[in-house]
Amino acid sequence: MSSAQLAQSEAFCTGLYYFRSGYFWEAHELFEPVWMALEEGSDDRRFLQALIQLANAQLKIKMQRPKAAKRLCIMVRDLLTTLTATRLMGQEISQIVECLEAVESHVDGVL
């Protein structure tokens, strides 16, 4: 499948729904097979890896593990800085950055 087809897949779309609804473990589980199907080294794959790690960071916050969440946020930011596009898999990168910043702000307020 192409990245455009994967972006329209039930797994990815349902993963986004879960992500936005606060079901971070479920989102991660749905995103992972899509990530594995994307071309190695592609922006789409790095983007989805960042989204998976961002879901993990938010899960760590729910688990009251702010240091683990902080470490994951650093990984997400590093991945996002490698992206050259402003939109991948139908998603605005700026919206993901805003979500990351909100998570970082929460973590920084706890640590």
Image: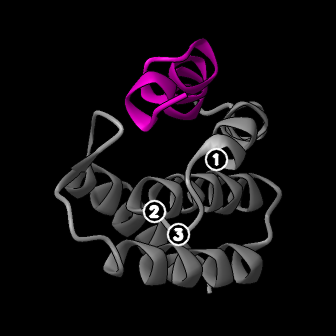
**What span is colored magenta in the figure?**
1-21
Which corner quadrant holds the C terminus? bottom right
Whether the residues at callouts 2 and 3 have beta carbons within 8 Å, the answer is yes
Q: Is residue 51 magenta?
A: no
Residue found at x 39% / y 62%: 43
Badge 3 amino acid: Gly
Whichever of labels 3 and 1 marks the residue nearer the N terminus, that label is 1
Q: Is residue 41 left or right of residue 82?
A: right
Mark 1 Cα within 10 Å, few/some/many (few <14, many 20+)?
Answer: many
Q: Closest to the observer: 28 or 35?
A: 35
Whether the residues at callouts 2 and 1 have beta carbons within 8 Å, the answer is no
Secondary structure predominantly adopted by residues drawn in magenta: helix
User: Regarding mark 3 in the picture, which secondary structure is present there?
Assistant: loop
Whether the residues at callouts 3 and 1 have beta carbons within 8 Å, the answer is no
Q: Which mark is residue 42?
A: 2
Whichever of labels 2 and 1 marks the residue nearer the N terminus, that label is 1
Which corner quadrant holds the N terminus? top right
Q: Position of residue 33 (x, y in %)?
A: 74, 37
Residue found at x 31% / y 62%: 97
Q: Which residue is mark 1?
A: 35
Query: How far, Cα to Cα, is label 2 from label 1?
Result: 10 Å
Q: Which mark is nearer the camera, 3 or 1?
A: 3
Q: Which residue is mark 3?
A: 41
Q: Closest to the observer: 3 or 76?
A: 3
Residue found at x 20% / y 56%: 94
Residue found at x 55% / y 54%: 39
Q: Which mark is residue 102?
A: none
Badge 1 amino acid: Trp
Q: Is residue 42 left or right of residue 30?
A: left
